[in-house]
Structure formats: C-alpha cells, structure tokens
Image: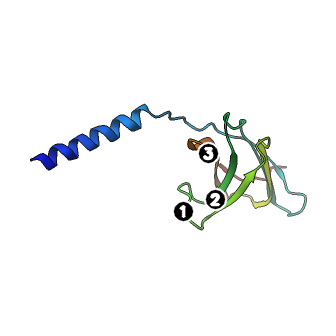
C-alpha cells in the first residue's frame, strides 16, 4: 500500500516539475529555394531561423529524411556561430522531403529555435 502512495507521489511530483518548466514551441524557419547552378534539376535550399535565445552557448542545425531524427539518419551542422541565422545546402534532388530542426544549448539545456519540413524543388 505504501509503495502505491510513493509511486503516485513521484508521478505527481514529475507532472508538477514538467508543468512548471518553461516550454516553447519552435518557430518555422523561412525557406527559400532556387535551382542549383552546379547540379541540373536539383535545388539549392536556404533555411533562415530566428536568433537564438539569450544565454545560448551553441546552436546546431540537424537535417534529415525522417522527422524523428533517428541516430545516424540525419546530418548535424554545428556548433554554428551564434550570429548565424541561415544555412544553405546545394544539390538536393527535387521532390526530396527534408526535415530540419535548429536547437540552442544554454546552461539550462537544449531549447528549440526552429523546426519543420519542406519538399525540395527546382522551379524555373
């Protein structure tokens, strides 16, 4: 009986800690696309995101083919310069769906800056 109360107390404490912690929803990056000059029919994709939050020590951009970013299935770019708020990638085949996320690391942990998905396209 006591074990059940201890368990319920821990669950309640966990819910309290989670609900009182600051949570933020990531913004969506601005996406611009053009036809690649180097790879015919492919796209150049540029992602632009808001400045990282105050106190950020590092910023990372992850790009992958799956929205859950499984280990080994995405490319991590970083740490980027804290003043950098855009990143361009050239030669992405048209029709490829990409997922991205930008995260900042501070003394309090990781914070989402931007996240979303896009379909690469070369439209002339």
| 10 Å crowding of disc 2: few (<14), some (14-19), many (20+) | some
Q: Residue furthest left?
A: 1
Q: Nearer the viewer, residue 54 or 48?
A: 54
**Residue 106 in sight in this render:** yes
How far apart marks 2 and 3 lie (CA) works out to 11 Å
Looking at the picture, does residue 6 appear above or below residue 24? Answer: below
Q: Nearer the viewer, residue 12 or 88?
A: 12
How far apart marks 1 and 3 lie (CA) works out to 16 Å
Q: Residue furthest right?
A: 37
Please state the total of marks drawn on the protein image: 3
Q: Residue 64: give its label.
A: 2
- Could you tell me residue 40's position as x and y percent? 86, 63
Q: Residue 116: give its label.
A: 3
How far apart marks 2 and 1 lie (CA) works out to 9 Å
Q: Identify the residue at image location x=27%, y=43%.
A: 10
Q: Are marks 2 and 1 in contact (CB under 8 Å)?
A: yes
| 10 Å crowding of disc 3: few (<14), some (14-19), many (20+) | some
| Residue at mark 1 | 70
Q: Earlier in the sequence, mark 2 or mark 3?
A: 2
Q: Residue furthest bottom?
A: 72
Q: Earlier in the sequence, mark 2 or mark 1?
A: 2
Looking at the picture, does residue 109 appear above or below residue 64? Answer: above
**Tag 1 secondary structure:** loop
């Amino acid at each position: 009986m006591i074990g059940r109360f201890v368990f319920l107390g821990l669950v309640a404490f966990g819910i309290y800690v989670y609900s009182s912690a600051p949570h933020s929803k990531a913004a969506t990056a601005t996406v611009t696309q053009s036809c690649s000059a180097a790879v015919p029919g492919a796209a150049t994709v540029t992602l632009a995101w808001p400045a990282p939050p105050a106190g950020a020590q590092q910023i990372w951009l992850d790009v992958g083919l799956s929205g859950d970013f499984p280990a080994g299935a995405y490319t991590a770019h970083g740490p980027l310069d804290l003043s950098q708020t855009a990143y361009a990638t050239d030669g992405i085949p048209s029709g490829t769906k990409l997922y991205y996320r930008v995260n900042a690391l501070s003394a309090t942990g990781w914070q989402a800056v931007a996240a979303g998905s896009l379909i690469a396209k070369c439209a002339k």
